Image (cartoon, grey):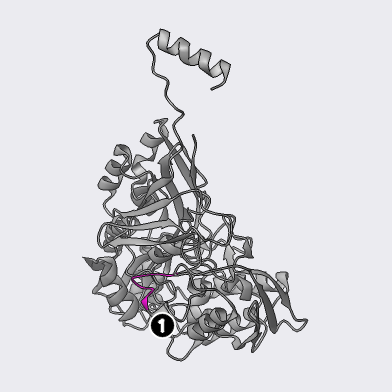
Amino acid sequence: MSKSLAAVSALAVALGLAVMPAQAARTDISVGMVLEPPNLDPTGGAAAAIDEVVYANIFQGLTRFNSDGEVVPDLARSWDISEDGLTYTFHLQDGVTFHDGSAFDAEDVKFSLDRARGENSTNAQKALFAEIAEVEIVDPQTVKVTLSEPNGSFLFNMAWGDAVIVAPETADNNATNPVGTGPFKFGDWVKGDHVDLTKYADYWGEPAKLDKVTFKFISDPTAAFASVMAGDVDAFPNFPAPENLQQFEADPRFSVIVGSTEGETILAMNNKKPPLDNIKVRQAIGHAIDRQSIIDGAMFGYGTPIGTHFAPHNPAYVDLTEQSAYDPALAQELLKEAGVSELTLSLKLPPPSYARRGGEIIAAQLKEAGINTEITNLEWAQWLQEVFKDKNFDLTVISHTEPLDIGIYARDDYYFQYADPEFKKIMEELNDTTDPDKRTELLQAAQKKIADDAVNVYLFQLAKTGVANAKIEGLWENSPTQANDMTQIYWED
């Protein structure tokens, strides 16, 4: 013991004080989530909650989104693109292993991409891989991907959670026992309560600062508030009770983090189901909705009105809100023109508070315009089955949180069943275009097309309203993708 430390200790003893060692910073965290994922395989499910647990934490892709939304290298350390834009040669990271100890190499990349684009693929975003013509192994650390036609969004597509790399030995079990290459490995899943992740000791990159992450599932806003106040949950990145944020802001124990998301919140309509196959009826529903009232009433002012399926923070955004402005009288007139006098529609709502609270307000507004609704509150698994898969609905409220996902309107079998040839041509041209100005022009044409066709009612861009213990650092302010990235999180001493 040094002389100075001995002197301090002697003084402390003389004063009757205990000499306490400095307290180490915590290395565990409990993170709140509104929805429990139906499974933990991002290549085999559409639920955003899957990526919220596993993206960047357990699974990784060739590329990834960072906190600013930029596409950056991940399992691919670099790549070369041929002059014709058809061939991407990916150079893979060295020394990567899966959580079961097996080595990652080009075979895994080929398996994952071929599996995602294959005839029997269950990937919810199979369209991301549509232009891939061939995947070739050059050597264990190099993969060549050849496209059938140029796609200016290919590296962007490879950053989605649906494009993560999985191993052929473990892929079939990833729904319940996910095995990836990320800085955390799967620990435990207590259904209806939580999922545990633990630090992967042999991670190839920068190690995580946390040893353990627990994702706790709390759908009720009141329970979410109580859990954060009591310290049972350390952070709630997408807090479901925005009415409580002012209370947290006034409490120095907490930090409130408000940012933007990629979540276009819509009143989705079944375009093939009469009378919603009539554009005048869809337009009437749009004019019956007061967006700002929903933002104020359901989100306590957090949210930005939108008039098409596109994020306002994107440079290519076009403000089309006036095209479907609140006008109950016009809504009634359009219904008359459509020959509709008595109309009752099902309104099936998933669990998030924006949907349940917003749905009640929407039902009241539609009633004022002469449209009755029958509300059914569904659990998440029910919504995925009845609405998303079976298309057994008239109306629903949902936030689409995937990045730059206007391309979903080009899918014939997508749940709102738009299937418009002209829109598909716009998206095909966009995929063939690399010039930034031309891409912006096409993206704006796509926005205008779905607004003109009143495919859905575009409500608001979901704000990211989070709350956390004030000592936690590294949480994302914005959500460029549906993720709770824990890789850079740490506690202040």
Q: Residues within 10 Å of mark 1 (few under 14, many from 20)?
A: some
Residue 268 in view here: yes
Residue 130 lies left or right of residue 328; in this view the side is: right
Classify 141 as above or below 412: above
Q: Position of residue 418 (x, y in %)?
A: 44, 81
Secondary element type, mark 1: loop
Three-letter amino acid code at the position of disc 1: Thr
Q: Position of residue 140 (x, y in %)?
A: 63, 80
Q: Position of residue 432 (x, y in %)?
A: 66, 82
Residue 452 in view here: no
Give the residue number, with chain letter if any, for mark 1: 122
Front-most of residues 50 and 332: 50
Residue 150 lies left or right of residue 48; in this view the side is: right
Residue at the right extreme?
A: 83
Q: Residue at x 29, y 53 (%)?
A: 218
By secondary structure, the bulk of the magenta-drawn segment is best described as loop
Classify 121 as above or below 484: below
Q: Residue at x 50, y 48 (%)?
A: 209
Q: Residue at x 57, y 16 (%)?
A: 3
Classify 196 as above or below 30: below
Q: Is residue 42 magenta?
A: no
Front-most of residues 355 and 120: 120
Q: Which residues, given as a range, are shown in magenta?
A: 173-179
Can you tell which quarter of the image residue 20 is in? top left
Q: Position of residue 184 (x, y in %)?
A: 46, 59
Front-most of residues 233 and 169: 169
Residue at the top extreme?
A: 14
